[in-house]
Amino acid sequence: MVDKSIIGREYPAFTFEVEKGKIREFARAIGDKNPLYYDEKAAKEAGFEGIAIPPSFPTVFAMAGGLMEVMLGDLKLDLAKILHGGQQYEYFKPIKPGDTVTGKVRIANAFEKSGKGGTMDFIVMETTYTNQNGEKVLVDTSTMIQRR
Amino acid sequence: MAGKQVFFENVNEGGSMPEFVSEPLTETQFVMYAGASGDFNPLHTVHSFGEMVGYGGVIGHGMLSMAVVGRGITDWLGNKALKKFGVSFRAVTKPKDVITVKGVVSKKYTEGGNNCIDIDLVAENQRGETVVTGNATAALPSKS
């Protein structure tokens, strides 16, 4: 049974420095050869302040922030039964290499749902990121599913 | 690879995003993605763990599937357009899978001074099974 009392629970903020080496490593891993991810000159000519960032790159912030460990430990979840059900990003301002982003996580929702695979528990984590100027840059909404 | 600039005037409701086809996924790529993303769930890299959980081996990260969908979008619209991007993971991916990403413009509108489109997205494997469904909102420049 999912514990509804976790809704609204917040976790300590974490920070992440956005480095161009990490962006390039990520772009290579996803198989994307777009020069905007590798070549600063090309990116600047295209109007970016530094190399561009793939849309799903912010997963790196979340992983570095230890969100999975938070989920597994604090919420007593079992890694072998957890699925990543869905992921959403809302982009407010550009994020560029050299930025330091600060993420704050809260449990936005927790509910159970029955389907043909039986009843499963859903936990929705919402992480709001601000940059070094205090501007809101991104909201990450991640839905985790625990099979029973 | 990013193509030429797409303007608001170039897209219409019901119109399609250019289809994007991935390279075949590989076990090496799952290891690379684990390192790059920091997601070291052994399901994606340790064969025996994948067998124990019942997948018969390693499976791809859901977020790698999302990244493949993202490539379809950025190849079409570039890296400045996205306002929202969301996916639901429908099926796992395995090594050698080839992912095809398709999109349809569901809505075209102006909001808060932005020229926006909503896109319905689906990614399928080589057997035609849905791997990911999703949607995105993008703001496009206008020719005028």
Image: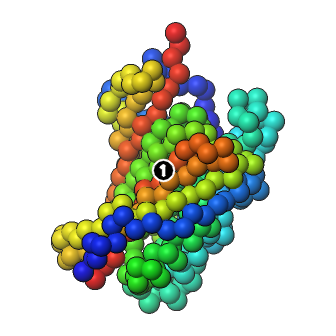
Foreground: A74 or A69?
Answer: A74
Q: Residue at x 48, y 38 (%)?
A: B83
Compared to residue B89, the image places residue A69 above or below, namely below
Q: Which residue is mark 1?
A: A139
Residue B90, image quadrant: bottom left
Foreground: A44 or B10?
Answer: A44
Q: Position of residue B1 (x, y in %)?
A: 63, 40
Compared to residue A33, the image places residue A21 above or below, namely below
Q: Residue at x 53, y 13 (%)?
A: B143
Q: Position of residue B49 (x, y in %)?
A: 50, 87
Under tag 1, what secondary structure? strand
Foreground: A52 or B70?
Answer: A52
Say whether residue B105 is left or right of residue B113: left
Q: Residue at x 28, y 77 (%)?
A: A3
Residue B126, image quadrant: bottom left
At label 1, the amino acid type is Val
Q: Residues within 10 Å of mark 1 (few under 14, many from 20)?
A: many
